[in-house]
Image (cartoon, rainbow, N blue to C red):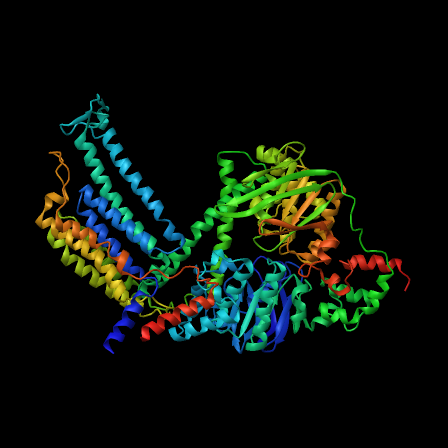
Amino acid sequence: MSSSGRHVVSHSYWLERDLHPGAWWLWALGLAAAASRTTNPVLLIMLLGVACTVVLARRGDAPWAHAFRLYLWLALAIVVLRVAFRLVFGGGEGGTVLIPSPGIPLPSWAAGVTLFGPVSAESVLGGLYDGLRLAVMVVCIGAANALANPKRMLKAMPGALYETGTVVVVAMSVFPQLAESVLRVRAARRLRGDTSSGLHALRSVVVPVLEDALERSLRLAAAMDSRGYGRSGDASVATRRLTGVLTIGGLLGVCVGVYATLDSSSPRYLAAPLLAVGVGVAVGGFVLSGRRVRCTRYRPDRWRLAELVAAGSGLAAGVLMWMTTRVDPLVLNPSLSVLSWPTVSLLPAIAVLIGAVPAVLTPHPAVEGGAAPAEPGSAVRTSAASSRAVR
Amino acid sequence: MIRLDQVTVTYPGAVRPTLRDADLTIPEGELVLVSGRTGVGKSTLLGLLNGLVPHFTGGHLQGTVSIDGTDTRYRAPRELADLVGVVGQDPSAGFVTDVVEDELAYGMEQLGTAPDTMRTRVEETLDLLGIADLRRRPLRSLSGGQQQRVAIGSVLTAHPRVLVLDEPTSALDPTAAEEVLAAVTRLVHDLGVTVVMAEHRMERVVQYADAMLLLPGDGRVIQGTPAGLLATAVSVPPVVRLGRLAGWRPLPLSVRDARRVAAPLRARLAEAPAPRDDSPPAGSTVLAAERITVRYGHVVAVREVSLRLHAGQVTALMGRNGSGKSSLLWAVQGSGSRAAGGVDIDGVDPHDLPGKDARRLVGLVPQTAADLLYLETVQAECEAADREADAAPGTTRAMLDRIVADIDPDQHPRDLSEGQRLALVLAIQLAAAPRVLLLDEPTRGLDYGAKAAFGEVLRELTARGRSVVLATHDVELVAEVADRVVVMAEGEVVADGPVAHILSGSAALAPQVCRVLGGGWLTVGDVERALAGVPT
């Protein structure tokens, strides 16, 4: 009995499904927090590898999943820019000069800035480490976007944010449409033989695109109205104001609290206490405004064991890295004044590797498209699975 | 179920009411067809049914509209969402979510339906409309017919008693239209939903309609049986015109009814000469496209298509949605992308020319013709077109007047009717006097009258030696105006030949007259001419 019960559990655990988007976001934020604590290139590259591994192992086949590449390019651009800035502006510091070059001191109104001074290894490395840290954080966010359907994330928002969520969803679908309509209109300009440039050309593209967008949004508004959007928007003005103040105030508190927690130089009383108060106030606002929303959710994502594994691994990575700050700060921020190969100790390495757990220990995403022509095949698969489960 | 009592609707700034003293009663479970020319108030009538008129559009409503006993005057459209489901002309414009399943559930979420009920209703609706295999597909990846069915499904899940459809099959190829109509009739028969539907392509729907609302254009709404109203109406489907010509009583509304009584007419026509010369004398080749290939990423939209266009010929380009018709037209014009192949017109390839010169050789009117318009008045558009084409001032306006007379020069192009706007865009493109004119779905949203006028314009163009290509789903239009038909599927040409040969030989593409009479008779005009030459 108990063994068959365990079989059922393990089977249902591995059933292909999309994890709750919140789990992926927590995982990614944990990794990003871990990255924010270190400039050690080895650790950062490991984090990058972990993020990529998990994305490759668990992303679906949706368009947003394929946008991950763009984040990688963005990350590369960040690193290159950081180093380039150091080359252009940051000359002078550090003793190990790689390229001796005379600086161009700027006139007095830009006092203190010298262009193209002697380039030192220290400043280049500083730029590289710094850029790498930011780049890895960006990639972590990109990983969350690739793994979690952004629209489902909005759906998982508390009821209070439902209407805001809908607005955001609609706005998000407008952008690809705008891009499409710009392309269409530009093609149409060529058909008309209009080769003009400048203000006239701009107008001949912008006017039809905006007209199209306006018409489209009016039609969408009519459609949403006829389908019942906003049936329950009857709160008193006072309640609405109160919930607004609570929500915004709480979120501000959360922002400051998070900043203080991550930035070790800010006063401690701003960190945990403010974070807690902020969360409390915001939750109060959400509950209050959520009460008047009578909408229901179709197939809401649920938190189950796999979500805990994914979110937990990211958070564990962040927490372990934070603990390393106490134990072994030099590993996290290798010295730039004495050039040496960065070293890695056990604790931060474990922290990073824990982040890779979801690549193995979470279920695969559901098959996208669902247009399974092999209807009988899938039936066979489920019956096989259930028979195994029974055994 | 639906009752209009002395309803008058006047929009702000309008000289006269759009609807005047409309009285009508529609019982539960009927399929009602709303008919009338463009701009007579069909959309207003449909909008009244869920309160969009006047709550959303503005305007002044007199009289009472009641749906299942509920007066729309005191209920906003969102409050009627559980009673009336509305699907607009362009279903994709009304989609809120991005996946089929979520879209079906959206309305129910707004109504606060219990989660278990939502699950079961979504499953039922998926099956009812035959879209279960699409459930996780992104909405933007669906074909037109699939989108239309999803849009219908998305309002059906709220279990409305009334379903309002505005032009549900206009943009669809014949097969997709059949799918949608089959789904709709199933709703009427199995669930007792009351359906009110406006549709220009009456030949597709009239046979399913229990009642008809005719809007003659003076604000009145006339209610009657389809057979009764169509006996005297101005715009009627071909099978009804054939019935009138042959004097059949009662007037047949479907091909099936007509075929039963058509034997004597068929016998008479057997003595007449063949309706159309099967091989019209082809003019000289104007344009030769060789092995055109278009690809988007991994998808090959057009695969090595070679096409010769002849002077004075109208070529219809047919094929289901997504078969590569538009891509081919754009590639031939030279503006679209082209992976391989070449076009030869007077020894040059328009692809290598700047847009200004390319359009002198090949003009293209795209599917969304309004994209070409960007100025505030018709007059300004015409003047800009003269400049762009280096034509004498007034050329475009003169062309426009030849196509459609009496367009107010100070009107905003967006305020024109569909037919007038098409005429304006045609005039703009013709100002450059191209040898070849390509038209992508030009008759979308045109009523029978506007289509006939459009046919006249095409005949005039070909008489002057132009070559015209027409990508369309409208077999009746093709039967009227085309000389040659090219059928595409999966980016390849699967059939190419004279119109009579291709249309009469195809099950899906045969026009109504051909289905009734067979033997190469395509249009009522053919029959009329033949009968004039045959003694009775």
Give whichever of B208, B24 is nearer the camera: B208
- Give whichever of B431, B516 is nearer the camera: B516
Which quadrant would the C terminus of chain B be assigned to in this image? bottom right
Side of A229 where B32 appears, left or right:
right
Residue B52, relative to residue A333: is it above or below?
below
- One can see residue A245 in this view: no
Q: Position of residue A241 (x, y in %)?
A: 29, 62
Image coordinates for residue A13, horizontal then vertical, percent = 29, 67
Question: Which residue is rendered at x = 85% and y = 56% of the image?
Answer: B273
Indicate the quadrant where residue A6 lies.
Answer: bottom left
Of B331 and B367, the residue lying toward us: B331
Q: Is residue B76 visible?
A: yes
Relative to B449, does residue B293 appear above or below in the rendering? Answer: above
Q: Is residue A68 left or right of residue B360?
A: left
Q: Could you tell me residue A126's position as x and y percent?
A: 19, 36
**Where's the N terminus of chain B, which quadrant?**
bottom right
